Image (cartoon, rainbow, N blue to C red):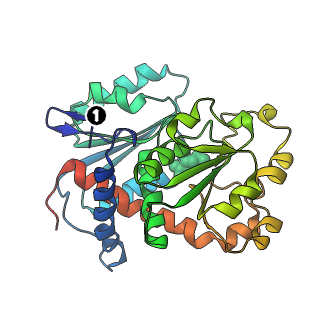
Amino acid sequence: MREVRGNRRDLLSISSLEKDEIINLLNSARSFAEVSTRSVKKVPALRGKTIVNLFMEPSTRTRMSFELAAKRLSADVVNFSSSTSSLSKGESLKDTAKTIVAMGVDAVVVRHGSAGAPQMMTAWVDCPVINAGDGMHEHPTQALLDLFTIRELLGRLEGLKVAIVGDIDHSRVARSNIHALRKVGAEVLLVAPQSLIPQDIRRMGVEVTGALDEALGWCDVLYLLRIQLERVNESRFPSLREYTLLYGLTEARWFELDPKPLVMHPGPMNRGVEIDSRVADEVESVITGQVAAGVALRMAVLYDLLGGSRG
Ligand code: NCD
């Protein structure tokens, strides 16, 4: 991966990856996906390696996914979660990093509420650092698993039309996906009220609209985002009900659509806000497919960075 320091590498962002590196990871994930279908879901590729999951922000699927990925590669995993948000973030992270170095671990997976925390971590530890979501900045493995899912289901990435709908401004998933989709040659249309679109976002090579219904007729993939209520207050739009009427995938919208796009969501979903609950049930297989792809993709990333021998 691009961030090369000495002979160690990190995965901090999609913006620093080349297209070839993205495609190689997707191809590698494909071979690792097979491991999860075996009755014994393990290969010895990272036997003897220790990986620390450092999650300083709530997470269900990303943390579990990294843990399963490491275990299926036969690595040992230590989970460290912290809700000590009252501590100064820089300090607590540095102290934790020192502990990690002292324990002699081989990789650290970091989720943090502050953008740039995984990057800071690289100065304090001597092993690869993987960004599992940092503030509103990036969530590279989410974007990679999304590309993997799209390619598996639609057979290609180049030239695809992808509409990303919702709280773009606060979304690290949107930022990583925009970088990733543009690098592999997909077209990206952002759909949201003006108040949830970052001002200079067009520089990333995307189009922007406020009209969901037009986007629905255009896209091959409809990527829905959660309103990040922990980072936004409703003053960005009149009310959640209003938001749903204008930007939600309601039953009325869904049943009128023909042909229907592939509907994706990074989770957790807010049923009844960005997606109607019955529509969510209809498209569930794709969304759970994203979760399954996450394990294979993270196996590919860990294998790539820790350089084990494939078993
Ligand atoms: C996302 C995240 O944490 O950024 N979730 C995830 O990793 N699957 C999206 C979100 O929280 O809405």
Q: Is residue 231 above or below residue 215?
A: above
For the point 32% across and 79% down, the residue is 38
Q: Nearer the viewer, residue 12 or 90?
A: 12
Disc 1 residue lies near ligand 1 with CB under 8 A: no
How many numbered badges does the structure rendering display? 1
**Residue 53 drawn at (x, y percent):** 37, 44
Q: Is residue 286 above or below residue 118?
A: below
Q: Nearer the viewer, residue 95 or 61?
A: 61
For the point 50% across and 21% down, the residue is 87
For the point 25% across and 39% down, the residue is 128
**Quadrant where the image shows the C terminus:** bottom left
Label 1: element kind: helix
Q: Is residue 88 above or below residue 76?
A: above
Three-letter code, disc 1 = Ile
Find the residue positioned furthest to the bottom: 39
Asked if residue 248 lies left or right of residue 151, the reply is right
Hey, which quadrant is residue 276 in on the image? bottom right
- The residue identified by callout 1 is 100
**Residue 134 drawn at (x, y percent):** 47, 36
**Quadrant where the image shows the N terminus:** top left
Asked if residue 299 lies left or right of residue 181, the reply is left
Residue 60 visible within the image: no
Hey, which quadrant is residue 179 in on the image? top left
Q: Nearer the viewer, residue 207 or 190?
A: 207
Residue 305 visible within the image: yes
